[in-house]
Amino acid sequence: MEVQKSAELTGHSNPIFSLELSQKPGILFSGGNDKGLVEWSLETNSFIKVMFPVMASIYAIHCPVGYPLMFAGLRSGEVLVFNFIEQKITHRLRHHVKPVFDIKSSAKKDELLIASEDGTVSVWSLKTLELLHSIPVSNDTVRCIAINPAEDRIAFGCRDNRVVIYALEDYSPIKALIGHTMAVFSLQYSPTGDYLVSGARDAQVKIWDNKTYSLIQNIPAHLFAVNHIAFHPTQPYFATASMDKSIKIWDVVDFKLRKIISREKGYAGHVLSINKLAWNGDQLLSAGDDKKVIIWDVSF
């Protein structure tokens, strides 16, 4: 596996907390502790524009497939809805009063899920943008959401160290996965749906069986918090990003470490915490507290 840095996107004046590929190929959105949500071209690796101003930090961005919409979750608890056809913010979802940390959607149900520091996950209709349910998941923050490929299970990562599995059909609780000793920051189901990967502030990555909910493997993955996990769309690898300023790429079959991208390994990488990852084909995009988005070309 070879990794080369191909570009650096600069322009943010504060830490970046969120990255999201647009529904339109070649477009990336980023947001963080800045005054606006930024649009970039991945074809020219350049700044396009500030999409819209924000009054609070952006912690989550989500672009649901099949809808001309982008959702931006703010530290204030508000979620802004930008309509690409109308080219403006058309709705403001004002339900949570504490920070929104993650936003995901179910294509099967046409529903949007929003995780908040208030310990609940709100469920909205993507068609009408009406509030449908509020799921009381935890007494503390819900940090992240993952929906399995079959769209019959949903996992929530909580600040109380738990991963909680729910049935997506009726949002009934199925199982709490106990193992992490600190807040769970990231969750991703494998593309096959066989297992769930969790990353936490305890620097551990855990692999959970999706049928038995048993722990398959624990990986002491990083020196500090695991902030994000991202599976390659077609290759058998996933990447983890950490507060320890490194990105690591793991094999999905035996969970062996295949690559470390860090300054210690000779890469001109991030100098502060790496907060978010996104795969654009064989390009791995990373963003962090150093206000940069770095584009890595990965050849397998």
Image (tube, rainbow, N blue to C red):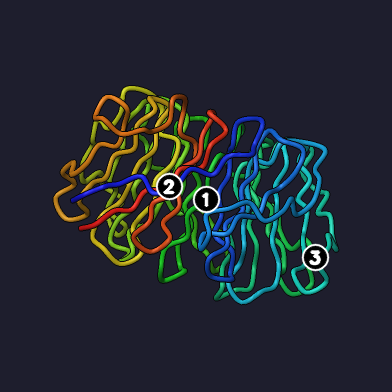
Q: Which mark is residue 130?
A: 3
Instruction: Find residue 161 and report its horizontal and vertical position in percent.
Output: 45, 31
Callout 1 secondary element: strand
Who's the residue at 29% across and 37% down the image?
261
Instruction: Find residue 101 and report its horizontal and vertical position in percent.
Output: 62, 41
Give the camera-side residue of 118 and 9: 9
Q: Say few, some or many: other residues with alpha carbon within 10 Å of mark 2 (under 14 / 14 to 19 / 20 or more).
A: many
Query: Is the residue under label 2 in contact with that under label 1 (CB below 8 Å)?
Result: yes
Quadrant of the image occupied by residue 266: top left
Callout 2 secondary element: strand
Quadrant of the image occupied by residue 105: bottom right
Q: Is residue 285 left or right of residue 170?
A: left
Q: Is residue 189 left or right of residue 276?
A: left
Closer to the chain start, of discs 2 and 3, is 3
Foreground mark, 2 or 3? 2
Residue that numbered label 1 is attached to: 145
Residue that numbered label 2 is attached to: 187
- Amino acid at circle 3: Glu
Closer to the chain start, of discs 1 and 3, is 3
Instruction: Find residue 185 and report its horizontal and vertical position in percent.
Output: 47, 37
- Amino acid at circle 1: Ile
